[in-house]
Amino acid sequence: MQANNKYKSSVFSLLFSDPDLLRELYCALEGVNLPPNVPVTINTLNEALFMDRINDISFEIGGKLVVLFEHQSTITPNIALRMLMYIARVYEKIIGDRNIYATKRLSLPYPEFFVLYNGTAPFPDEQVLRLSGSYEKPEDLGLPRKAAPALELEVKAININHGRNEAFAQRCKTLAEYSAFVAKVRAIETECGDKAEAIRLAVKHCRDHDILKGFLEKHSTEVQNMLFTEWNWDDALAVRYEEGKEEGWEKGKEEGLEKGHEEVLDLVAKGYTVEEIKRKLNQPPASRG
């Protein structure tokens, strides 16, 4: 299967582009029940500034602004920083042409941040990631230590892999079925060794067994193209990052994911397999001696 680079959304963002499903997901995340008439306003950023494929969703519900990312590769320790940059742009979008220098205080929806982890590397059921984890320690600079930083941002990361967080999965049937679909793709790929064929067979299996049936019937071709592209993208970037760590290239450790982003995405869009991408990227930097 040749990846088609016209697809910018991920399967996850396409699935949860329905406000009713987002309401269901939010209620599961927060452990609350909201009536179906509570409005959901989607304001996801589509600019390539943040990503070349959209696996994020931001929306307003009940006076809150919720930002959530889906990750199928290793969660970057910079996720809180990415969320900070993201929320600033979303607030800018919400405020529009209102004057931020006016004497009247502008009202903003209350922010909440989630990462839904769907990768294969070991990860706890839940983990809180904080922006302050990236700060230099004041005491290391000879400054007094403060009880709390002036700027903090907390991201709740939840493991949504099939079989994990069962109570959470039971509160959101759609997310549980999505996780089951992803697990089926991985199981079939392990058996047959062909990613494209595994995705095709998993789509058929899930449609036949009433797992995301309506969604897969409507978007079967899109889902196969999207998932093939995004999984190659995740795999190849993870390889590049891990190779940078193993070889001890400082720039590879710090910038591997970002620096190789465009190069990897271009190779994925051209239909290269992960093994082919690995061979193409497995070249030491010119300055390495």
Image: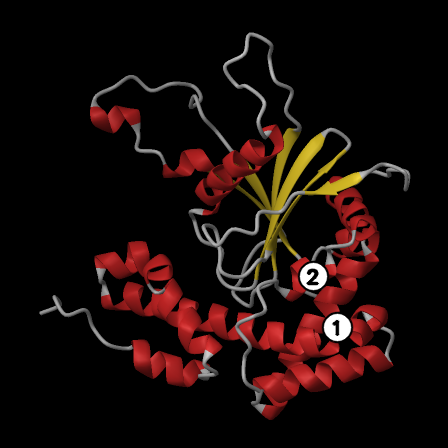
Q: Is residue 4 above or below residue 51?
A: below
The N terminus lies in quadrant: bottom right
Q: Amino acid at mark 1?
A: His
The C terminus lies in quadrant: bottom left
Graded by Cα atoms within 10 Å as few (under 14), some (14 to 19) or many (20 or more), the crowding at tag 1 reads: some
Tell whether label 2 touches label 1 (CB within 8 Å). Answer: yes
Is residue 2 at least partly visible in the picture?
A: yes
Of 198 and 171, which appears nearest the observer? Answer: 198
Q: Amino acid at mark 2?
A: Leu
Residue wearing tag 1:
219
Q: Is residue 274 above or below residue 231?
A: below
Residue wearing tag 2:
14
Graded by Cα atoms within 10 Å as few (under 14), some (14 to 19) or many (20 or more), the crowding at tag 2 reads: some
Residue displayed at 75% across by 72% down: 219
Q: Position of residue 59 (x, y in %)?
A: 69, 42
- Element class at badge 1: helix
